[in-house]
Amino acid sequence: MVQSDSSGVPLPREEMPDWLLPLRTAFLASLLSRGLKTGTVRDYAPAVDWLCAEAGRRGLTTPDGVDGSVLAQVLEPLPARLSVRSGRIWASVLGRFIAWLVKENAVAVAPQPPEPAQTVHEALMTDYRAWLRTRCGLAPGTIRSRQGVARRFLAFRFGDSAPGDLNAITRADIVAHFGTVGETGPAGARITATALRSLFRFLFATGRIERNLVPCVPSVPAPRSPAPTWHLSREEVERVLTAAKGDSAVARRDHAMLLAMARLGLRGQEVIAIRLDDIDWDAGEILVRGKCGRQAAMPLPVDVGEAIVDWIRHGRTGRSRHLFVSVRPPFPGFTSAAPVRKALRKAHAASGVAPPGGRVRCHVFRHSLGMALLQDGMPLADIGNMLRHDSARTTTVYARHDIEALRPLARPWPVPQPAAEAGS
């Protein structure tokens, strides 16, 4: 029997080593079991057949001495007739095939070269990242931002010899560094100040510096007028949610995600962090995994539960334990809030509701819920609990929108008295 690749070039079955033939069949079957369509797997088969035949032509007739690196070398001269796009697809498929062979213990793991010894600077950044993750419970994006500020400051102070003698850092060095970030504006300066305080707190806590430099970081005044709280009215929220509905798997997933945000005030990262095990259907509760590793059990509204059930029964598939996953094989969970923003952007466009401030934000439903609760007369402390604010100060941003509640606090404007009455 003769196999052929996508270009019609025959691949004689006898050129394929006997030990690879059953593995080739099992790998293609595993792709089907992970949700890939039959046509897609059929398109992938010529690439796998080519690798098997090429291994036979190179004398790899037995698995003895074959490891992942040996098979990877076979991939280096992919057929020249392939287009750039086809070459990328073949490289991806064959890389997956080799990884599967290693996972199934069909071939040995490629020997790993010894890792180069970490420099002092790399070791410092590694320890700082672990400290931010375990001690501070920060999100990966925040950790990357803090590390970036730390690297820039150390490079500014020590140049190529970073990190240098950390005890040599002075307040003058810290103030001078702010002159290099002034072009980012007050917001960038505040981010830098927060990150530097974090860095010096870490250095002092771990004994890398002898004195605490946190007080040496200058304070950057916040704007007198706080940033606006972008929100929608109740009617606009419902229009956006209605526009997100649909019968496709994507629409069921997106509607469930947006409804959870609107009813529970979830952040984008909190939505994608929900796992199947976080829902207690008997108790009617859902576990919310918030910022800094904090968790809170919240009541699950009926409409949110119904939307989640509809997504699970008629759209969700795959082996991931995350509640919201991709609709494309192998159906992984999300690693960022980008799919949430995309769903919100589509819903805004379909509903005709312009995003407040002209920009789609994951926090729009969260702020809208806070404003709705305030208009219903809920105390700020209860709103803060509902939105899981870490500080009561965070909740006070909603107070400036409730003019009627603030009116009794205003002192009356002094009315000048006539001169005659003042003399009597």
Image (spheres, rainbow, N blue to C red):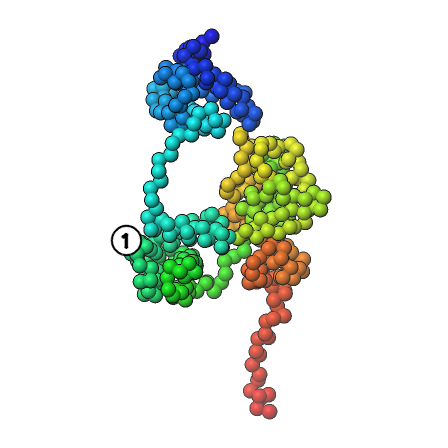
Report the front residue among 94 and 313: 94
Question: Total number of numbered labels?
Answer: 1
Report the front residue among 371 and 199: 199
Q: Which residue lies most toward the right here?
A: 282
Residue indicated by mark 1 = 161
Task: Where is residue 353? Give x, y as percent.
Answer: 57, 45
Residue 189 appears anywhere in the view: no
Task: Where is residue 387? Give x, y as percent.
Answer: 60, 54
- Specify whether 71 is left or right of 26: left
| Residue appearing at x 35%, y 35% in the figure | 113
Q: Quadrant of residue 398?
A: bottom right
Q: Which residue lies most toward the left here?
A: 160
- Depicted 210 relative to depicted 26: above or below: below
Q: Is mark 1 on a helix, strand or loop?
A: helix
The disc labelled 1 sits on which kind of residue?
Ser
Q: In which quarter of the image is residue 182?
A: bottom left
What quarter of the picture does the C terminus occupy? Answer: bottom right
